């Protein structure tokens, strides 16, 4: 309707110009003709400019609408509950993204949607294995992880643990489940890889006629996710002849910060050795002599299991790693908050800092909260403190460390022994 209006206005302007020129007939015919031509040309230019402006506005509106539609579809699958139409929603979101121009993709913005949801390169998903095959036999080892949408980390960390377990126990079929539906949807929509959630995995085990089920979580501790996993398994216990749930990485929690165990000691030694080696030192003592501190950033939790982070700090000190510090993204416990850890490292006199995740995977928290470019990332905050000569990051999950994988193998062995006992 707006284009018709502009054309009418242009036509009126041209007619008015022509009439004015003819009525002004005090000059020569040539002058009159020139005047008419000039007036007509001006009116035509104004009409073209008006139409061009309108077309630009229409294109901008169309870009915004297309970007918003895609953002809405992404937000619709950024949920923790799977429904009957989840698969269709995942397909629709990806189709909407693929239909966008590069300009429109940069405009995608929603409650949780942004251009990186589909646009960020996190590695080759084809290298992963969702481990959701059927006809697997009577013995299943279900490896339960929170999950990550970072493909390279999923392959190195989660698949790395699963592969180690399969190699250690060839008579058991290793299968996968993620507890984060948000991540499952992300991977499915972007990469076409379908990973089972807990209910799907347990239903699949029942349908496959599994008799003996061992559940090995890759979770760090006995936190909220571990509790939810146990509740889900409990609902299916009567569908199997035997079920056993293995310990998470850090083992039993303990009553206070002073209580440590063999699992925490093994984890502390393994992750410190890996960080020290990656940084180019022979051992932690050599790094300390060079003024280098290592800061491991965990997630943090309000769950009572948060004392595990304090216990890990105690473990580091017990093992003589005075230049190793434990922090958390959430700042729970309080003394693990970024600003608190900065003060600890500063007071201890270290001038060089290496940041590394205390997480099974190197996903969003490691890449953004720890090593991101935003002002609130740990890397940025440590640099902004102005008291360190250098601040470096090691973006690698715990799951790719061989000694960590062996701990999961050991925990599974204990669960098997409990199953048989």
Image (cartoon, rainbow, N blue to C red):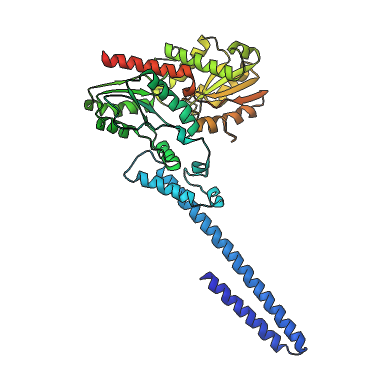
Indicate left or right for 32 with 289 as reference: right
Horizontal placement of 189 versus 36: left or right?
left
Q: Nearer the viewer, residue 31 or 332?
A: 31
Residue at image coords 46%, 23%: 399
Q: Nearer the viewer, residue 290 or 20?
A: 290
State the image coordinates of residue 107 (x, y, percent, origin top left). Answer: 54, 50
Residue 156 x %, y %: 48, 27
Let me know if residue 258 appears in the view. yes
Choose top left, top right, bottom left or bottom right for residue 138: top left
User: Which is nearer the eye, 341 or 158?
Assistant: 158
Q: Which of these two is toward me, 163 or 189?
A: 163
Q: Provide residue 287's location: percent of width, then percent of height.
A: 62, 14
Question: Does residue 284 sit above or below 389 in this rendering?
Answer: above
Report whether residue 261 is seen: no
Image x and y of residue 384, in percent: 64, 29
Q: Residue at x 57, y 29 (%)?
A: 378
């Amino acid at each position: 309707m707006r284009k018709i209006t502009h054309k009418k206005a242009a036509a009126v302007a041209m007619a008015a110009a022509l009439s004015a020129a003819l009525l002004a007939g005090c000059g020569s015919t040539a002058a009159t003709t020139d005047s008419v031509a000039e007036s007509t040309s001006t009116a035509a230019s104004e009409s073209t400019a008006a139409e061009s402006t309108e077309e630009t506005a229409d294109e901008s509106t169309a870009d915004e609408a297309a970007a918003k539609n895609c953002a809405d579809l992404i937000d619709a699958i950024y949920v923790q509950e799977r429904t009957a139409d989840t698969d269709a929603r995942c397909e629709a979101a990806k189709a909407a993204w693929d239909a966008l121009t590069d300009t429109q993709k940069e405009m995608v913005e929603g409650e949780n949607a942004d251009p990186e949801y589909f646009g960020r390169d996190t590695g080759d998903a084809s290298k992963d294995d969702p481990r959701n095959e059927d006809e697997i036999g009577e013995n299943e080892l279900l490896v339960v992880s929170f999950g990550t949408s970072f493909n390279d980390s999923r392959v190195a960390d989660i698949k790395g643990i699963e592969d180690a377990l399969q190699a250690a126990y060839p008579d058991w079929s290793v299968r996968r489940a993620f507890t984060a539906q948000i991540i499952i949807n992300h991977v499915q929509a972007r990469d076409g890889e379908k990973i089972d959630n807990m209910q799907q995995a347990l239903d699949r085990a029942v349908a496959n006629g599994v008799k003996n089920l061992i559940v090995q979580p890759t979770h760090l501790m006995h936190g909220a996710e571990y509790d939810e996993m146990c509740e889900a398994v409990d609902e299916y216990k009567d569908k199997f002849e035997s079920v056993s749930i293995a310990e998470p990485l850090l083992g039993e929690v303990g009553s206070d910060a002073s209580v440590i165990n063999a699992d925490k000691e093994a984890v502390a030694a393994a992750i410190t050795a890996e960080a020290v080696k990656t940084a180019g030192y022979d051992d932690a003592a050599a790094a300390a002599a060079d003024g280098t501190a290592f800061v491991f950033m965990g997630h943090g939790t309000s769950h009572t299991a948060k004392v595990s982070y304090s216990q890990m700090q105690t473990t580091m000190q017990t093992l003589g790693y005075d230049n190793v510090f434990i922090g958390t993204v959430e700042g729970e416990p309080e003394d693990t908050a970024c600003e608190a850890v900065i003060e600890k490292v500063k007071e201890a006199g270290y001038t060089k800092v290496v940041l590394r995740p205390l997480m099974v995977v190197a996903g969003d928290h490691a890449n953004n909260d720890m090593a991101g470019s935003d002002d609130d990332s740990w890397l940025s905050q440590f640099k902004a403190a102005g008291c360190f000569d250098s601040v470096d990051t090691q973006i690698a999950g715990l799951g790719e460390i061989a000694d960590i994988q062996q701990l999961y193998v050991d925990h599974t062995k204990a669960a098997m022994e409990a199953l048989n006992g």
